[in-house]
Image (tube, rainbow, N blue to C red):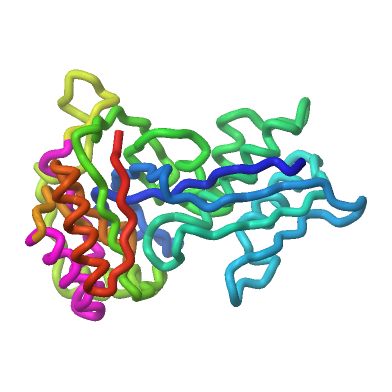
Amino acid sequence: MPDTLSAPAKINLALRIVGKRANGYHDIESLFVPVPGLADTLEISAAPIGSGCVVSNQPDGCPPEENLVFRAWRAYAEATGFAPDIAVRLEKRIPTGMGLGGGSSDAAAMLRWLEARAGGAALGPARLSTLAAGIGADVPFFLDGGSALAEGIGEKLTRVALDLSAFTLVLALPRAHVSTPWAYAAWDAHAAVEKPAQDGNERLTTQGTTNKRRVSLSPVVARNDFEVVVFPVHGDLRIVKERLYSLGAACAVMSGSGAGIAALFRDSLLAGEAADALRRDGVPVHVEALG
């Protein structure tokens, strides 16, 4: 019987771009929240000797060697010498180009599976996280459960206690695709002309709270620096966000570099009505009780 792994999506309830490094990468501060009800599935089974890692049913247009599941297997094999021959059937439910981290979550699921079976070759949490960051900035987040404050390029994580049990998530998935490299380039051009606000009160931080591992929902959520450059080009995303507010959302914000728009509703019935309204508008929606 194959092993079946779940690879959940994530949303960013806040994303602030702090600056750009000399190597071209960007420092961020972001609040990552898992969405377990929206997940890809990996089915892993033994393959003939010498097969390596064969990934089937992968997204259209993605060469096998660029698939993050394969890259995770290869990176782990190179780091540890543990390279089981496996066949991976990838079932995608997390749409791409939505800022939901589907590929990174798939890679993390692969790494967790390998680490659990590597025996004495296992890397341990710290080295596994470092390896994961080399595959993708979001991959370390998916190695463990729960929400996290992400800093650096996204690899520096502080797990936080975030009680969202009073909210229902309405995740709008507009039929648009936003390229992350394009979004960062557009942000750089914007920042060169108009210096972003550096309001210390909006800095995403856990400082000043009774429990250093807690983070408040206010005032940092519902802010995403990418919106200022993405919305002028993808006006339909701005319309969806405004529509969610008009339908009763407590907050709404673009996730990652887009195009997904995450909204939190305090009333689950209102959330359901909002989801139905968006579907009538032709916008796919995922609804999930949080917490």
Q: Nearer the viewer, residue 129 or 2?
A: 2
Of 5 and 201, nearer the camera is 5
| x and y percentages locating residue 161 in the rendered image | 29, 27
Farthest residue, direction bottom:
233
Q: In screen coordinates, is 187 left or right of 59?
A: left
Horizontal arrangement in the rendering, residue 100 relative to residue 109 (left or right): left
Q: What's the magenta region? A: 217-246
Residue at left offset 41%, top offset 45%: 37
The picture quadrant where one finds residue 92 is bottom right
Query: Magenta stretch containing residue 228, yes or no?
Result: yes
Q: Position of residue 50 (x, y in %)?
A: 90, 54
Q: Is residue 256 magenta?
A: no
State the quadrant of the N terminus: top right
Q: Is residue 250 above or below residue 98?
A: above
Residue 47 location in percent, x, y?
Answer: 85, 51
Looking at the image, which residue is at 60% across and 37% down?
Answer: 128
